[in-house]
Image (tube, helix red, strand yellow):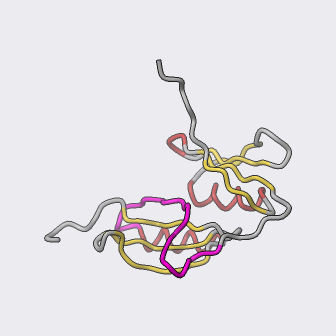
Amino acid sequence: MTVQKTPVLALDCAEPEGLARFYAGLLGGEVRPGPGPDEVEVAGPDGVTVACRRDLGFAPPSWPRPEGSLQAHLRIRVAAADLDEAEREAVSLGARPVATGTEDGFRPVRLFSDPAGHSFALMAADPPTGDR
């Protein structure tokens, strides 16, 4: 028998309420109280949950790293035709653009940091059609 599990992406930050509002806006989710006084959760569509936890000694991750490692990051897939609109929406909510490029040489991707400095990527859901 397999025990039911619910994955939650937990992000440390200095201001959990503000970061939760950012991700609720970005993911189309709803902000709700977390399990403790220093945690707020975002219930996103399709069962995605992002927890924003207060850490008084929080320091933003160092990203991008010189060797190109993204560290742990959130990937948000959108239709390729909606990538520009998704980027404008993310920036209007407080995201900071870091880089653009392609994943695997074919799939368009835009890299950002959220208001607390965590990295995330907006990525085309499918690679472009045509010859590789």
Looking at the picture, does residue 49 appear above or below residue 26? Answer: above
> In screen coordinates, is 28 left or right of 60?
left
> Could you tell me residue 52's position as x and y percent?
72, 53
> Could you tell me residue 84's position as x and y percent?
44, 74
Q: Which sits in the foreground, 61 or 82?
A: 61
- Report the label total: 0
Q: Residue at x 60, y 72 (%)?
A: 113
> In screen coordinates, is 106 left or right of 88?
left
Q: Residue furthest toward the left? A: 131
Q: Residue furthest toward the front? A: 67
Tell me, yes or no, whether the highlighted magenta stretch contains residue 66.
Answer: yes
Q: Quadrant of residue 63?
A: bottom right
Q: Quadrant of residue 11?
A: bottom right
> Could you tell me residue 122's position as x and y percent?
47, 66
> Could you tell me residue 12's position as x and y percent?
73, 57
> In screen coordinates, is 45 left or right of 84?
right
Stretch of the chain drawn in magenta: 62-82
Q: Quadrant of the C terminus?
A: bottom left
> In screen coordinates, is 115 left or right of 38?
left
Q: Which sits in the foreground, 91 or 97?
A: 97
Q: Quadrant of residue 27?
A: bottom right
Tell me, yes or no, whether the highlighted magenta stretch contains residue 5.
Answer: no
Q: Residue at x 76, y 52 (%)?
A: 53
Q: Residue at x 48, y 60 (%)?
A: 75
Task: Provide the major secondary structure of the magenta segment.
Answer: loop
